[in-house]
Amino acid sequence: MTYQPLVSIITPTYNHEQFIGQCVGSVLAQTYTNWEQIIIDDGSTDNTNEVIKTYNDRRIRYIYQKNVGIWKLNETYNKALALANGELIAILEGDDFWPPDKLEVQVPFFLNTNVVLAFGEQNNVDMNGCIIGNHPINMNLFPRERSEVIKKLLLGNFIGACTVMCRRSTLYEIGGFQQHPAFPAVDYPTWLELSLKGDLLPIDHKLGYWRRHDGQITNYTMILSIADNGSEIPMNILAKIKREQIFSINLTSYEIQYTCANNKAYAYFFLGRKALTNNNWPEAHKYFSYSLKRGYSILRIGSLLGLFCALTKNDMEWIVKVFHKLNFRTRKMPSNLWYI
């Protein structure tokens, strides 16, 4: 490989003592070696810093800051961005990890100067790093026209953050990582802004492992906030596209609102599953009733199963695992709650 730009890896972390070792270890194991990792510790109260200090590699920089929390997550990301020296930026949060060939596979695609962001297949893993789900890239179904890619993204976030690589110059062009005041994440608004500047490129290759656990923001405590406020972000971008006549996109505000309403139903479906695992049958019944009334047809089937499990006081996770093994996914299923 003759094209070997420096890749700056941005790693925000908070109380990831249990996971940060695997995260850093997966970076050290990369077959592509021209990288730097910038770890921003948002005031961890566990032994995260002690674990990081065991790694003696000049390419790793560790910065500890007073806790600012998830509602100022963009400040944490942009602090790391300001410290980055690389031409390319990769995202790897402290509880996630990579396959060894992640950077080597992804970097060459940026020889195409039209590409501002590339992403790939993601595996979901549990607390112990065991695979519990897979989100492949279907290249045959992925739209080729840039306007159609933006349209697809306006209807939901299909990009796994741990698989992302983007150009530092384009991030600066949009003002750094973006965050809506009522949305506890930077990925979706940032991808949307980047999509207006250049091509988003899918790569049919496993590029990241995303960990599911109780402490993450895209799980239980923040899931309804994400669902409630998620529609404002694409609505704002759609208005910007039409106002500045950037593209001709055949999409209405109603379609976005309708999709986001279904995503909220998915959030309730997910909370219903969590209630079942906690043996909270009345709560499960409430959540599944909501998702049954407001979700798409496939979601309604799952909600009916959830109601049955709530009434019979049974868990439904074994059913979910079967569905995942059978790749129980269709194009109608929403993508901006892909972690469910």
Image (tube, grey):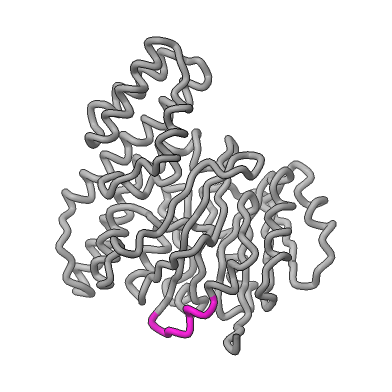
Question: Outermost residue toward the top?
Answer: 312
Vertical side of 260 occupied by 309: above or below: above
| Residue 195 place in picture, x, y as percent | 35, 69
| Residue 174 place in picture, x, y as percent | 42, 72
Vertical side of 309 occupied by 197: above or below: below
Taking the spot 68% from the left edge, 60% from the top edge, the residue there is 26
Residue 64, magenta (yes or no): no
Please state which of residues 87 and 301 is positioned toward the viewer in this rendering. Answer: 301
Question: Quadrant of the rendered structure where residue 10 is?
Answer: bottom right
Q: Quadrant of the N terminus?
A: bottom right
Q: Is residue 107 left or right of residue 157?
A: right
Taking the spot 44% from the left edge, 38% from the top edge, the residue there is 223
Taking the spot 42% from the left edge, 50% from the top edge, the residue there is 181
| Residue 332 place in picture, x, y as percent | 25, 46
- For the record, the magenta segment spans 107-114
Question: Quadrant of the rendered structure where residue 258 is?
Answer: top left
Taking the spot 32% from the left edge, 72% from the top edge, the residue there is 196
Q: Give the dominant element type of the magenta stretch: helix, strand or loop.
A: helix
| Residue 23 place in picture, x, y as percent | 68, 55
Question: Outermost residue toward the bottom?
Answer: 2
Q: Is residue 215 left or right of residue 174?
A: right
